[in-house]
Image: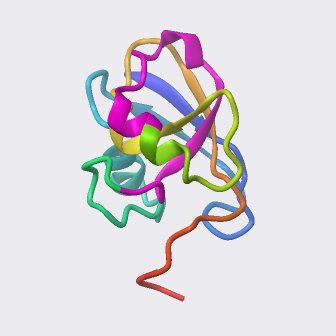
Amino acid sequence: MTRVILLPHPETCPEGLALEIKPGKVLCDALLAGGVEIEHACDGVSACSTCHVIVREGFASLSPAEDEEEDQLDKAWGLTPVSRLSCQIRVGTTPLTIELPRYSLNHAREHE
């Protein structure tokens, strides 16, 4: 199992969270299974930027982003050089520290 630390986010995860995730799992799915209500408007097909995360530690261990992901990231709020879409990250064996951006560009939030 790989340790993934989610830094505190005022709305989604105020206390932060540490999860043990099986390598090979998609990060967005693992966060949802762990009780983190991360936005995911396109259901993980890299067609939006709502599951945007900032990889504060472990970024270099991730496989490079595909062109579709890069195109969607260009639309993300608060884009950084270590931004990724959580629906496109397969957890490996390197521990990760993840930050959720303060805002999302989701115009159709399911729970307000």
Q: Residue furthest bottom?
A: 112
For the rendered model, the colour scheme is rainbow
Instruction: Kindly identify the residue that appears in the image at 57 percent across and 67 percent down.
Output: 105
Q: Name the image quarter holding residue 26.
A: top left
Instruction: Kindly identify the residue that appears in the image at 72 percent across and 52 percent down.
Output: 8
**71 or 20, which lies in front?**
71
Residue 83, above or below 94: below
Name the quarter where the C terminus is drawn: bottom right
State how many labels appear. Answer: 0
Task: Provide residue 66's location: percent of width, then percent of height.
Answer: 35, 26
Instruction: Kindly identify the residue that appears in the image at 54 percent across and 19 percent down.
Output: 95
Residue 94, above or below 99: above
Q: Name the image quarter holding residue 39.
A: bottom left
Task: Provide residue 107's location: percent of width, then percent of height.
Answer: 49, 79
Residue 39, above or below 108: above
Name the quarter where the N terminus is drawn: top left
Q: Name the image quarter holding residue 53.
A: top right
Task: Provide residue 67's location: percent of width, then percent of height.
Answer: 36, 30
Report the side of 50 relative to 6 (left or right): left
Residue 95, above or below 79: above
Report the side of 19 relative to 16 (left or right): left
Question: Is residue 63 found inside the magenta-colored segment of the image?
Answer: yes
Task: Provide residue 50's location: percent of width, then percent of height.
Answer: 48, 59
Task: Give, as a single range, the part of the protein colored magenta.
Answer: 48-70
Instruction: Kindly identify the residue that appears in the image at 43 percent across and 60 percent down.
Output: 35
Question: Is residue 54 found inside the magenta-colored segment of the image?
Answer: yes
